[in-house]
Image (spheres, rainbow, N blue to C red):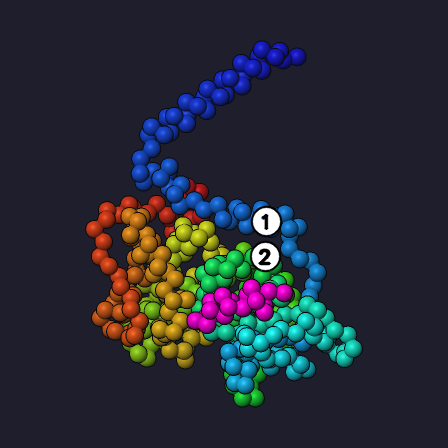
Amino acid sequence: MISLELLSAFFLLIESVSSFQSVSFLKNSKPGSALFGAAWSNGQAIREYQDFLSSGGGDKNLQSDGPCLIITSDKSNPSPLAEAIYKMNKEKTDIYIQPEDEIPSTMPSFGTKDEERTSFPIYVCLPEKELSDAISKHLFDNWEDKRDDLVFITSNGNIEPTLKKFGLPRDATSQLLVSFTCPGGDFQPMDNSVNLGLDSQFQEKFAGESVSCGKWKDAIAARLDANEIRCRPLFLRDFKRNMWEKCTFDAVFNLIGASAGDDVTLKEVAEFYGDDASEMAWQISSMLRGSMAIALSYGFEERMFEYATRKGAKTLCKIDPETWDFINGVFLEISLLGLSKGFGDPAPLHTEYVAYCVQDKGLLKGKEINIPETTIEQRESIMRKGNLRADGVI
């Protein structure tokens, strides 16, 4: 038997050693060391994972598709995205409404006239620049009772910063990342994903696929699948990885291509400007890990280049002032914040290209973008390319 005195002495020894190590570590720590590296730590990912576990792993009740509401700026002239969502309903029973319209309390079920459901998807097909104003005006008014039924769509930009302002990107919040065509007239939407073959586990892998999350993720996927459009239902944390990967692709390839010339395609960027595209993508990947605790999924570089090569032969690169704030502007804002605080620019190549496009080529006319020179001493970043540890230790 171990005596009580011996146990007490043992724990006292452990406490003494721990205290000595902590003091020694603090004495030897300097800015730029592992202690300073803790400034990059972000507990958001841990909190999200804890919320995911406490929720029991998400909603396991599969939702079926059916008649839905589609919110568009002008219901008499729906946007191409709103039309595409409508066309995917084989029975054409969806209803267009405008943000200010009253939302009906019930909608019919598929294939019946008598049965009605009180919960149904409401696709918010508004341009990114209109979304913040619409949410501000209507979320706590005529959208309040149907908040959990809203489906927010990422099409031509990243709307997560907008949703965060209103506390909306939660596990239950339905979202759709679009990767399909939105043709007009009588043409049907078509899938834009690329099959990359089999992975090491002999599972098919894809680039540029549509993904959904939230309460209605399965109903969204069912609607797209019925139209031969690949859509993977995911939980929020994986959805965000896909969304930021698409935003990174759009920012990198279009910025480099637009700076090279007026007629450069996405495929040509992959073939002739691959070094810069790869380096910029990796820098943005490090930026996301350090500032938002978001790690792009393994193989993102391969997916970006394969998608550009296979789907981008006829797509001209451009940077659009209308969507700038939701693509490149998101990354530039983080870079300028890092420089202003003395933490350095986590994506300097992106900032350099932006400065060239704005100051030398004048590609964003009507858009005021100021990249000030700073005299603040910058600390060297300790983020390592392709490594999840801030100190570079595996």
The amino acid sitting under disc 1 is Asp
Q: Please tell me which residue is depicted at 26% across the width and 69% down the height of the picture.
A: 358
Q: Please tell me which residue is depicted at 58% across the width and 46% down the height of the picture.
A: 50
Q: Which mark is residue 51?
A: 1
Q: Which residues are magenta?
A: 128-145
Q: Is residue 294 above or below residue 268?
A: above
Sequence-wise, which precedes: disc 1 or disc 2?
1
The image shows residue 309 at horizontal and vertical percentages of: 42, 72
Quadrant for residue 280, please give it. bottom left
- Label 1 neighbourhood size at 10 Å, few (<14), some (14-19), many (20+)? some
In-image side of 185 versus 36 (left or right): right
Q: Please tell me which residue is depicted at 29% across the width and 69% down the height of the picture.
A: 368
- Label 2 neighbourhood size at 10 Å, few (<14), some (14-19), many (20+)? many
**Which residue is at the front of the view, 27 or 179?**
27
Helix, strand or loop at mark 2:
loop
The quadrant in which the C terminus is found is top left
Q: Are the residues tagged 1 and 2 within 8 Å (C-beta)? A: yes
Q: Please tell me which residue is depicted at 49% across the width and 21% down the height of the picture.
A: 15
**Which residue is at the front of the view, 234 or 303?**
234
The quadrant in which the N terminus is found is top right
Q: Is residue 368 above or below residue 241?
A: below
Magenta segment: does it hold 319?
no
The image shows residue 125 at horizontal and vertical percentages of: 53, 74
Helix, strand or loop at mark 1:
helix
Quadrant for residue 333, please give it. bottom left
The image shows residue 253 at horizontal and vertical percentages of: 37, 68
**Main secondary structure type of the part rendered in magenta:** helix
Judging by the rendered image, the residue that carries numbered circle 2 is 171
Q: Residue furthest right?
A: 114
**Which residue is at the front of the view, 56 or 302?**
56
Tell me if residue 177 can be seen.
no
